[in-house]
Image (spheres, rainbow, N blue to C red):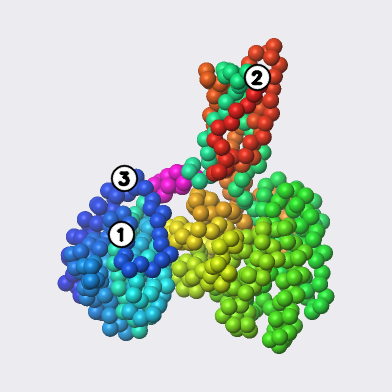
Amino acid sequence: MRASMGRSPSSSVLFLVWAAAALLLNAALTVQSVPYDYSSSSECLAEPLEAHYGGGVIVNSDFSAGLQGWSAFGYGSVTEGASPTGNKYAVAANRTRPYQSVSQKVYLQNDTHYTLSAWLQVSDRSADVIAVVKTADNFIHAGGVDAKSGCWSILKGGLTPAASGPAELYFESNSTVAIWVDNVSLQPFSKEEWSSHRHAAVKKARKRTVRLRARDAAGNPVPGARVHVRQVRSAFPLGSAMSHEIITNVKYQEWFAKRFTVTTFENEMKWYSTEWTQGHEDYTVPDAMLRFAHSHGIAVRGHNVFWDDPNTQLGWVKALSGDQLRAATANRMRSVMSRYAGKVIAWDVVNENLHFDFFEEKFGAGASAAFYQKAHGMDGSALMSMNDFNTLEQPGDQSGLPSKYLNKLSQIKDAFPGNGIGVRMAIGLEGHFGANPSIPYVRAALDTLSQAGVPIWLTEIDVKPGPDQAYHLEQVLREVYSHPAVHGIVLWTAWHPQGCYVMCLTDDNFNNLPVGDTVDKLIAEWKTSSHVGVADADGHYEAELFHGDYQVTVTHPAAAANSTVVQSLRVDRESDNEYTIHV
């Protein structure tokens, strides 16, 4: 039992002295503004990279001083190991319990975000290794990785302790393998520092400084030209799922269309909605929803072609023989994708294939890869997206670990001719959060997933109800929006008169609830307020703008000139940052 874990009382006095010193060090580190390190790795390396932040509050993070500062956890055995190049690390071997490993005691501060990283290896094949922080009253899962033998994998995670006090970091894994640990880091950040990281990331990833040059017909500068810059549309896709209720509910339509630029149909495009009875297809509802979305310039994600969860399969699908199911899936794919090809921006081709394997059980381990290849052939313009849960939400869910997500993504890509070069893959993360999301873990998981180099979308965000639901939703949205690898956000807030899946943004009269106010606040914050000013002596006017579409109006300062020019601009990462406007 975990309650039996511990150490002899002889170490308690030393720990109290050490904890006091650690508290002072922790406070000192928190006061300073430490930049956040977004680096991670999806590769298994021959030698581990250096510890982030020099190890942070971890003592002897690289084991260069042997096992100083480290102990055996759970009455296990820990020894010092060394590579042929002289790199030192800890080895927890002869393990008989999952929790037996190397550990270090630390002192944690409440209201502080901690980012964690460690390089790990196991003695045989591969095994999940989970970082756990034991506090006075809890065991906190801080992250995990699918570690391998013969090379080093990085575990990147984090936590926010609920209370200040002593804690102990250790690692859990299958008791049949030895765990090798190296270059461990635990870095504290105040919430103010964490927020400053977000602001810096938003400035770099979501904004661009643009210089406008006012010129007359002869190409001369026009000092004092009056400039008005107005944002017409945001470039960052932010939206919500919608339900079929929107087809006939005018209030729902008006509320939705003035806020969102992207949507996912909650259920209406799924197989069980379009072919409830075998051979009788009905696309009346999704067709109408698509018409509404496109009439208001709202992009649509195709959700979904297949769902790997056996509990979502219709009875007639489950009853089919192998050959019959193969024919039925081919028909389903042709039916839905030929109908909506070129009309959706992405396809969730096989939903939740990290956690479930209905089609793999029927067709073999390569089922998902085969579906993705066929889907790409039918709609090569759309993103081919995986879509799964708990990769951000639950550090302890071993099926959803970021490393396992990347492994599955690689399996799908590598099955394409040329290893998927030219195929537009995407990472879809549902984001169904509990009542108290781990914000440091969200950032760390995104860091790891970003190593794939493909667009990351948050596809189904909600937060369980609780007294601080609106606050936690805001923290989640700010975190994912600020991460440079995230390309879009969809909330899972489709409205029904009988209630929403987990989280409604409005009441039944479409008056905002607190979470709806949060969303509206962020939509407004992530847009550029109108800029009004005059060009300088060189005819230049500069403005820092969120990415998006703009209308720029420039008026000649001389009334006699009677010249006003209106020009449209697109501002994004790749666009020009200087524009000449002749007035």
Marks 2 and 3, how far apart in space?
A: 53 Å
Does the segment drawn in magenta span residue 106?
no
Mark 1: which amino acid? Ala
- Residue at (22%, 62%) from the top-left corner? 60
Q: Nearer the viewer, residue 347 or 172?
A: 347
Q: Which residues are magenta?
A: 191-202
Mark 2: which amino acid? Ala
Give the residue number, with chain letter if any, for mark 3. Answer: 32
Is any part of residue 108 visible from this angle? no
Give the residue number, with chain letter if any, for mark 1. Answer: 51
Give the residue number, with chain letter if any, for mark 2. Answer: 217
Secondary structure at numbered mark 3: loop
Marks 1 and 3, how far apart in space?
A: 19 Å
Q: First in sequence: mark 1 or mark 3?
A: 3
Marks 2 and 1, how far apart in space?
A: 59 Å
Q: Position of residue 551 (x, y in %)?
A: 66, 33
